[in-house]
Image (tube, rainbow, N blue to C red):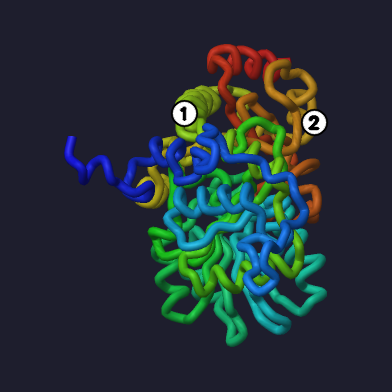
C-alpha cells in the first residue's frame, strides 16, 4: 500500500470510513477509543494574558466541538454547530434574517418550522411565503424586493415532495439569497446539499443521526467560514447549545448511520410497494415508487430514497383505529430510530398547522407517517395488515 493511501485525510475517505474515522475518534492524550466527555461549565486560565481555547461551555466545549467538526466533515461544509434541538438549530439559523426581511419556504414544511415562522418570527417582522417547491415557477414568483432567503425541505415532511436543490440554489445565488435546507430525512449519507450549492444544512439530529430515541439535538453546517462566523455569534449569543453528554451520545449513534439507513431503506421500499397494493390504502408517498412525481429529480440529487413512508387510509377515523391497533411500531412523535415509529401528523408533528392549511397541502386527517426501523419487514407488514383490516 502506498504512503499516499496511508496518509489520506478524513475528508478524502469514503462515507462509511468517515463515520468511524472523523479526526477525533481517538483521544490524543490518553488513546481512549471515544471522545472524552468534558462535563465542565468553565475552564481555568493558566495565563490571563493568553486565554485558553475554551473558557465557558456555552461558547465552546471540546466534546461538542468534536461533534461539530464531525457533522461538517460528513456534509462537506466549513463549520458545524450543535444545538439543543432541531428547532433550536432552525430558530437560530433563521435569526440570520432581520426585521422587514422575507423568506420563501417549502409549503408542506415540518409543523414546528411552520409554527416558528407564523407565530414567532412574524412578530419580529420576518415575513414568510409558503410555496409548492415542486413548481419552480411558483418559487420564482414568490420573490419580493425584501426576500433574503429560501428554506427548503426535501423530501418534505410528511408528504415527501421533492424540490430540485441545485436549480433552486443556483436561482437563489443569482438573486443574492441565502439558502437553507432541512436534511433530516436524507442525512448526509443519502444527500449532501452543500455540494449542490446550498449555504446552510440543518438537521433534527434527534432522528436518523442519533437513531436511538434517546437524544434531543440539532445540527447545522455552513458552506463557508464567513457564514460560519455569523452563525457562531448567534449560537453563542443565544446559548442554544448542545450539552457535552448529549454530544457524546449523538456521536456514538452516528457511527452506525450508514448501516442503519441501508437496512431501514430496504425495508421502507418493501413497505411502500406493499402499501401501494393494499385495498385499504388510498395513497402512498415515497420517492422510491415508480409513480412518485419527484422520483427523477430525487435520484439526481440523492443516493437513496430514505426510510420514511407516508400513506393515507381515507379518513381520520380509520387512521386512529389503525394507530390504536398496531403492536410493533411506537405510536409516537419523531422518526429515524432503530425501532419503527408510526406518527399521526394531524395530531402530532403538524398539530400547530390549522386544519384548512394542512388539508390544502395534502396533510389530510387520514395521513400517517411510518418511519421504518430495524425490525424484520415481514413482521412489520403482518402487523400493519392486521391493523388496517381491523
Residue 96, percent from left and from top: 64, 74
- Label ID, residue 109: none
Q: Residue at x 75, y 26 (%)?
A: 323
For the image, the number of numbered tags is 2
Seen from the viewer's position, the closer of residues 106 and 149 is 149
The quarter in which the C terminus is drawn is top right
Q: Residue at x 47, y 74 (%)?
A: 172
Q: Residue at x 51, y 22 (%)?
A: 274
Rendered position, 28 above or below 55 = above
| Mark sitting earlier along the chain (1/2) | 1
Residue 349, percent from left and from top: 74, 45
SS for dot 2: helix
On the image, numbered disc 2 is attached to which residue? 317
Q: CA distance from mark 1 to mark 2?
A: 37 Å
- In the rendered view, does 245 fall on the left or right side of 65? right
Rendered position, 31 above or below 91 = above
Residue 195, percent from left and from top: 39, 59
- In the picture, residue 81 is in which quadrant? bottom right
Amino acid at each position: 500500500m502506498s504512503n499516499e493511501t496511508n496518509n489520506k485525510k478524513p475528508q478524502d475517505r469514503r462515507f462509511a470510513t468517515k463515520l468511524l474515522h472523523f479526526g477525533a475518534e481517538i483521544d490524543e492524550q490518553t488513546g481512549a477509543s471515544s471522545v472524552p466527555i468534558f462535563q465542565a461549565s468553565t475552564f481555568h486560565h493558566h495565563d490571563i494574558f493568553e486565554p485558553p481555547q475554551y473558557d465557558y461551555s456555552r461558547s465552546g466545549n471540546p466534546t461538542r466541538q468534536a461533534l461539530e467538526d464531525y457533522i461538517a466533515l460528513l456534509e462537506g461544509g466549513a463549520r458545524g454547530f450543535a444545538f439543543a434541538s432541531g428547532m433550536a438549530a432552525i430558530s437560530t439559523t433563521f435569526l440570520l434574517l432581520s426585521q422587514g426581511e422575507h423568506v420563501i419556504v417549502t409549503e408542506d414544511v415540518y409543523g414546528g418550522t411552520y409554527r416558528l415562522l407564523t407565530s414567532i418570527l412574524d412578530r419580529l417582522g420576518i415575513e414568510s411565503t409558503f410555496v409548492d417547491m415542486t413548481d419552480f415557477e411558483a418559487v420564482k414568483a414568490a420573490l419580493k424586493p425584501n426576500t433574503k432567503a429560501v428554506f427548503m425541505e426535501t423530501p418534505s415532511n410528511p408528504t415527501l415532495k421533492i424540490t430540485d436543490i441545485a436549480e433552486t440554489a443556483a436561482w437563489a445565488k443569482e438573486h443574492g439569497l441565502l439558502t437553507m435546507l432541512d436534511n433530516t430525512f436524507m442525512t448526509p449519507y443519502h444527500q449532501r446539499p452543500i455540494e449542490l450549492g446550498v449555504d446552510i444544512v440543518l438537521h433534527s439530529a434527534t432522528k436518523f443521526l442519533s437513531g436511538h430515541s434517546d437524544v434531543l439535538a440539532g445540527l447545522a453546517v455552513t458552506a463557508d467560514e464567513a457564514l460560519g462566523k455569523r452563525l457562531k455569534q448567534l449560537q453563542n449569543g443565544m446559548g442554544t447549545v448542545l450539552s457535552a453528554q448529549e454530544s457524546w451520545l449523538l456521536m456514538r449513534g452516528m457511527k452506525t448511520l450508514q448501516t442503519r439507513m441501508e437496512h431501514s431503506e430496504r425495508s421502507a421500499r418493501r413497505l411502500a410497494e406493499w402499501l401501494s397494493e393494499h385495498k385499504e390504502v388510498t395513497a402512498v408517498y415515497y420517492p422510491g415508487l415508480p409513480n412518485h412525481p419527484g422520483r427523477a429529480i430525487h435520484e439526481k440529487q440523492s443516493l437513496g430514497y430514505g426510510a420514511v413512508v407516508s400513506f393515507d387510509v381515507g379518513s381520520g377515523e380509520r387512521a386512529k383505529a389503525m394507530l390504536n391497533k398496531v403492536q410493533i411500531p411506537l405510536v409516537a412523535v419523531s422518526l429515524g430510530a432503530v425501532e419503527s415509529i408510526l406518527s399521526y401528523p394531524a395530531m402530532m408533528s403538524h398539530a400547530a398547522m390549522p386544519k384548512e392549511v394542512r388539508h390544502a397541502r395534502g396533510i389530510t386527517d387520514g395521513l400517517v407517517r411510518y418511519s421504518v426501523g430495524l425490525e424484520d419487514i415481514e413482521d412489520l407488514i403482518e402487523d400493519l395488515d392486521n391493523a388496517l383490516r381491523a
